[in-house]
Amino acid sequence: MKRDIIAGNWKMNNTQAGTKALIKDLAPLVADATCEVVICVPFTDIEVARKAIRGTNIKLGAQNVHWAPKGAFTGEISAEMLKELKVEYVIIGHSERRQYFGETDASVNARTKAALLGGLKVILCVGETLEERESGKTAEVVIRQINGGLEGIEKADLKKIVVAYEPVWAIGTGKTATAQEANDTIAIIRKAVRKLYGKTAANALRIQYGGSMNAKNASELMAMPEIDGGLIGGASLKAPDFAAVVHYNK
Ligand code: PEP
């Protein structure tokens, strides 16, 4: 049985004090969650978050990882470094990384391979821009991102990957894809995965929706048959808001 996964992407928010306070507020609110609960925090908050989530059901994630095991890559962080801090998940290929930091399908693929090799689980982000959607290219774009991101990755490793479908036009904008739009595109993504790995593996893959998901729309989105979770930006920064998304089924 697949277990839904709700992950918070804190982006570049919260110092260590804020991290401690937010987790302290959040932990009791999500203690009864039936889904898997993850927070993906800035690198500098990982150690504090690791301690703060001890004894809770909250899992720890980071927001990026480098493709090399070590070396002259100023400003980067390796999978081994994250693993040492007990990080379990890492977001790779977020649209903000693609848009502002030159992330490509090839670099997303290299980072994904390094994360898996280093024992991390991956939240692999894909999604089309507004221009791509309006010109009818959504399917083409997400299929390309899936094929590129997963190139050379073994079927056995697919179990350690969660895909996040995040239409770029819906991230941080307050515009959500309708539940039907999200479901339809996720079905296209799953079909692309089926072509690569077969039906059983594709059906077992968890695919999240992300893009202005919040307490108001989470239930409707999560009720869709193809949607197995959410990647939550803005609404993950306040404990009651994130807890409400985690309780989408209540
Ligand atoms: C995100 O950054 O992954 C995201 C979905 O952000 P928001 O929920 O703020 O749209």
Image (cartoon, rainbow, N blue to C red):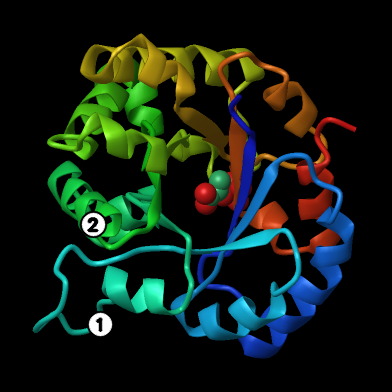
Residue occupying the point 30% across, 65% down:
65
Gap between marks 1 and 2, in whole Å?
Answer: 21 Å
Could you say where residue 66 lies in the image, as x and y percent from the top left?
23, 67
Q: Which mark is residue 120?
A: none
Residue occupying the point 71% across, 40% down:
35
From the viewer's perspective, is 92 left or right of 171? left
Could you say where residue 99 lies in the image, as x and y percent from the top left?
30, 52
Q: Which mark is residue 75?
A: 1
> The C terminus is located in which quarter?
top right
Whether residue 135 is visible: no
From the viewer's perspective, is 148 left or right of 238? left
Q: Which residue is mark 2?
A: 117
Whether residue 48 is situated above or below residue 248 in the rendered picture: below
Q: Would you call the spot at circle 2 few (<14 residues within 10 Å), some (14-19), or many (20 or more)?
A: some
Marks 1/2 in contact by CB < 8 Å: the verdict is no
Could you say where residue 34 lies in the image, as x and y percent from the top left?
78, 40
State which tag comes first along the sequence, 1 or 2. Answer: 1
Of badges 1 and 2, nearer the viewer stands 2
Element class at badge 1: loop
